[in-house]
Image (spheres, rainbow, N blue to C red):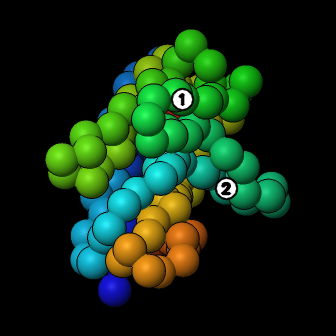
Amino acid sequence: QVQLVESGGGLVQPGGSLRLSCAASGTIFSIYVMGWYRQAPGKQREVVAASISGGGTNYADSVKGRFTISRDNAKNTVYLQMNSLKSEDTAVYYCNAKIRRTSSDYTGNYWGQGTQVTVSS
């Protein structure tokens, strides 16, 4: 009933920039947290950045100063602006959101299908 759809991934050269978008749709009462994870081959999925309702952001140390997460509450959309990209940033990036669908529903954890980001010369 809730869907998260990512877009904006692709191939970029080192030092380049890319902007990811994630839009939540369906039956939504409230979104508490929206964020981005990534998973590279042979590695576990890790948190990249998170945006918390009411204000506040958090970033992984590896992307601090290079990535910026932003949120458009009216559109239920979260963005990830990625600058100064490195080869180490190559991974599948997943959108994640904690969403309550109705006033009586529990808070669920939802995932997008992922978008590939490849940083290479």
Which numbered disc covers residue 57?
Answer: 1
112 relative to 51, above or below: below
Q: At x 60% / y 51%, what residue is drawn?
A: 37
* Label 2 SS: strand
Residue 61 picture quarter: top right
Q: At x 32% / y 68%, what residue is drawn?
A: 29
Q: Residues within 10 Å of mark 2 (few under 14, many from 20)?
A: some
Q: At x 69% / y 31%, what residue is drawn?
A: 60
Disc nearer the start of the sequence (2/1): 2
Residue 98: x %, y % from top left:
52, 62
Tell me which amino acid carries mark 1: Thr
Q: Can residue 87 be seen?
A: no
State how far apart marks 2 and 1 are (Cα): 20 Å
- Is label 2 or label 1 in front? 1
Residue 21: x %, y % from top left:
31, 48
Residue receiving disc 2 = 39
94 on left or right of 20: right
Residue 70 or residue 46, whichever sits in front: 70
Q: At x 34% / y 86%, what residue is drawn?
A: 1
Tell me which amino acid carries mark 2: Gln
Q: Residues within 10 Å of mark 1 (few under 14, many from 20)?
A: some
Residue 77: x %, y % from top left:
28, 50
